[in-house]
Image (cartoon, helix red, strand yellow):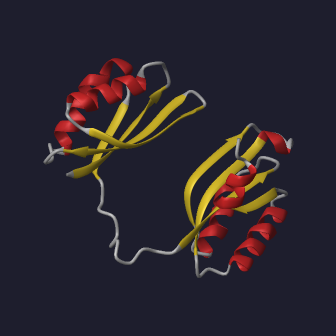
Amino acid sequence: MEKIIITVLGSDRPGIIAAVSGSLFRQDLNIENVSQMVLQSEFAAFFVVTAPDGPPTGRIEEALRRDLSPLSLSVHVKKLAPKPDAAAPLSREPFFITTTGPDQKGLVARITGVMAEHGANVTNLTAVFEGGDDPGRNIMVYEVDVPADADRTALSAALRAKAAELCLDISIQHRNIFDAVNKI
């Protein structure tokens, strides 16, 4: 089975997920993963689907465009690259890094730059900037995989120094601690 990733973008309104999933169902495609969000008034979603013995991506995209045309959505379809060799999985530890503080240009670039220098991979990012100096109105939550052999003390110190430089409050928690503290 071939895996395909589909991106759907457009103005948010009720029925988008129903329209996309209905089109995929009619094409005999199985949804494996979905990540969907609304940013301000814009809908964005990624679908990973499996195709039985591969209809070409062009045909899938054409059917989606036809089915979604009443909703004026942009669609992009491509084959999903195979996973790296599973025989040599990378050992990583999951962390949540949260920053709050005054809004300014380049916050995401400067914080993720520090993460990249230490080999940390951002797997999910949620950022809400409402402007102004009220720290509660500007928040970034990063889910980050840190290599097991990385110097976590150096990463933490570098992130804290960058946060101080940017006048941000920062919290760094291993996912296990985050999950335990935030369990409902």
Residue 143 horizontal/vertical position (percent): 61, 56
Left or right: where does residue 75 sit relative to residue 152? left
Left or right: where does residue 62 sit relative to residue 75? left
Residue 153 horizontal/vertical position (percent): 74, 78
Q: Is residue 136 above or below residue 119?
A: above
Picture quadrant of residue 151: bottom right
Q: Nearer the viewer, residue 182 or 81?
A: 182
Residue 106 visible in the shown view: no
Q: Is residue 173 above or below residue 85?
A: above
Q: Residue at x 60, y 62 (%)?
A: 144
Residue 2 horizontal/vertical position (percent): 21, 52
Q: Residue at x 71, y 54 (%)?
A: 180
Looking at the rendered structure, the number of numbered marks drawn on it comes to 0
Residue 28 horizontal/vertical position (percent): 20, 34
Quadrant of the snapshot with the C terminus: top right
Left or right: where does residue 140 sit relative to residue 61? right
Residue 96 visible in the shown view: yes
Q: Residue at x 17, y 37 (%)?
A: 59
Q: Residue at x 27, y 23 (%)?
A: 67
Q: Nearer the viewer, residue 36 or 148?
A: 148
